[in-house]
Image (cartoon, rainbow, N blue to C red):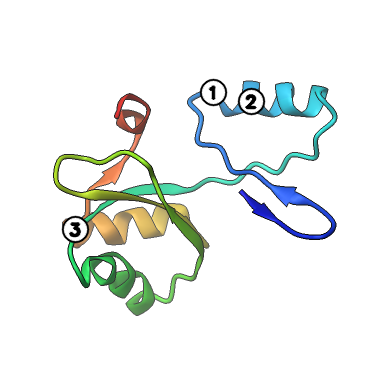
Amino acid sequence: MSDSADMSNVRFICDDPDKAVRVLQDAGNLVKRRDVLAVETPDHPGGLSAVLKPLAKAGINVHYLYPYLRRAGDNAILILRVEEVEKATEILKGEWISVLEEEIYSI
């Protein structure tokens, strides 16, 4: 969640985004749907660079990122909003970075 003088932003990760949008809009909220990536990140100093360096090298901007509150084994999980989700996914998988898909909902 982020807050400003005019509005607050709350970000959700949900397994049924269409339903979430409907419920939130029906309650009178302004809703913007964004696709994001969930990636496993090495949990040690410098681990974030393993994710960000390949994206920077490919010229893919990261609009924001935040931690997911659960872990994947010994790894941290990051949620990233990037310019080109499909291209970013391909690049990260090519660098042996685990991109989580449906399994994120059961962690």
Specify few, some or many for label 2: CA neighbours under 10 Å numbering under 14, 14-19, or 20 or more: some
Q: Above or below — where is 61 with respect to 21?
A: below
Q: Position of residue 84 (x, y in %)?
A: 48, 59
Q: Above or below — where is 26 with respect to 81?
A: above
Per the image, the residue denoted by label 3 is 42
Report how far apart the C-alphas of labels 1 and 2 lie in the structure.
6 Å
Q: Say left or right for 2 vs 37.
A: right
- Amino acid type, label 2: Ala
Residue under the point 82% across and 60% down: 5
Q: Above or below — where is 48 with respect to 26?
A: below
Q: Are the residues flagged by discs 1 and 2 in contact, CB closer than 8 Å?
A: yes
Identify the secondary structure beneath mark 3. Answer: loop
Identify the secondary structure beneath mark 1. Answer: loop
Per the image, the residue denoted by label 1 is 16
Quadrant in the picture for the C terminus: top left
Q: Say left or right for 53 vs 96.
A: right
Label 3 vs 2, first from the N-terminus = 2
Per the image, the residue denoted by label 2 is 20
Residue under the point 22% across and 66% down: 47
Residue under the point 25% across and 41% down: 71
| Image quarter of residue 21 | top right
Q: Position of residue 46 (x, y in %)?
A: 22, 72
Q: Say left or right for 57 vs 25.
A: left
Identify the secondary structure beneath mark 2. Answer: helix
- Amino acid type, label 1: Asp
- Amino acid type, label 3: Pro
Q: Position of residue 81 (x, y in %)?
A: 50, 56
Q: Position of residue 72 (x, y in %)?
A: 21, 40
Numbered-mark total: 3
